[in-house]
Amino acid sequence: MLPGPARILECPFCGKEKKVMSLVSGNTIGEQIWSDTKKVAPMLPQISFVQKCPACNYFYLVDSYRQGHRYSEDEHDWTLEQGNLSFRELCLALYYLEGAIGSEYETRIRIMIVQAFNDNYRNQKKDIKSVSEEDRNTFETTDRKSVV
């Protein structure tokens, strides 16, 4: 993996800039694919297509066609920030974006919610009984809607 200059995203609500990673080169050596379709490729990490603004806390989609590709002009200005959201942040993002984005994006966010839930409770070998009632209800509702 060879990081490139930071990609600069601009919040469509407040205009605050956020730097996320870009890659000059990467590969899939050591990639793992989980049963919930999550892919983990240590040498080819991807930024999340759902981002949270650090200033106004609004959620927005990273759309290459609308936002374009803008990178830091300093080649030494790089970051490994991917903008990945937690389980609860993804649930909030879906709540605020649902209906305003296409069904394909909603489905992708629902799948990300399931994967984040699994990361929190299953992959870390936490006792499933320790799942909060709120998280369980959110997961079960999201899981049913994600089925194609």
Image (cartoon, rainbow, N blue to C red):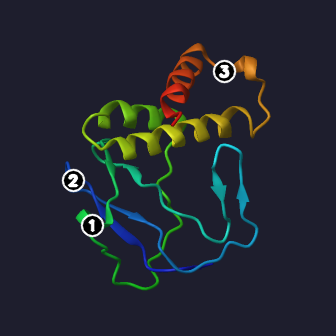
Residue 65, disc:
1
Q: Tell which of 77 and 22 is nearer to you.
A: 22
Q: Secondary structure at mark 2?
A: loop
- 3D distance between C-alphas at marks 1 and 2: 14 Å
Disc 1 marks a residue whose amino acid type is Tyr
State the residue at coordinates (39%, 40%). 106
Camera-nearest residue between 129 and 98: 98
Circle 1 SS class = helix
Label 3 sits on what residue type?
Answer: Val
Per the image, the residue denoted by label 2 is 12
Residue at 73% from the left image edge and 73% from the top image edge = 29
- Quarter of the N terminus within the rendering: bottom right
Q: Is the residue under label 2 in contact with that under label 3 (CB below 8 Å)?
A: no
- Write down the quadrant of residue 67 in the picture: bottom left
Residue at the spot 54% in from the left edge and 66% down from the top edge: 80
Mark nearer the viewer, 3 or 1: 1
Mark closer to the chain start, 1 or 2: 2
Q: Residue furthest top?
A: 133
* The image quarter in which residue 107 lies: top left
Residue 51 at x, y percent in the picture: 39, 50
Q: Which residue is mark 3?
A: 131
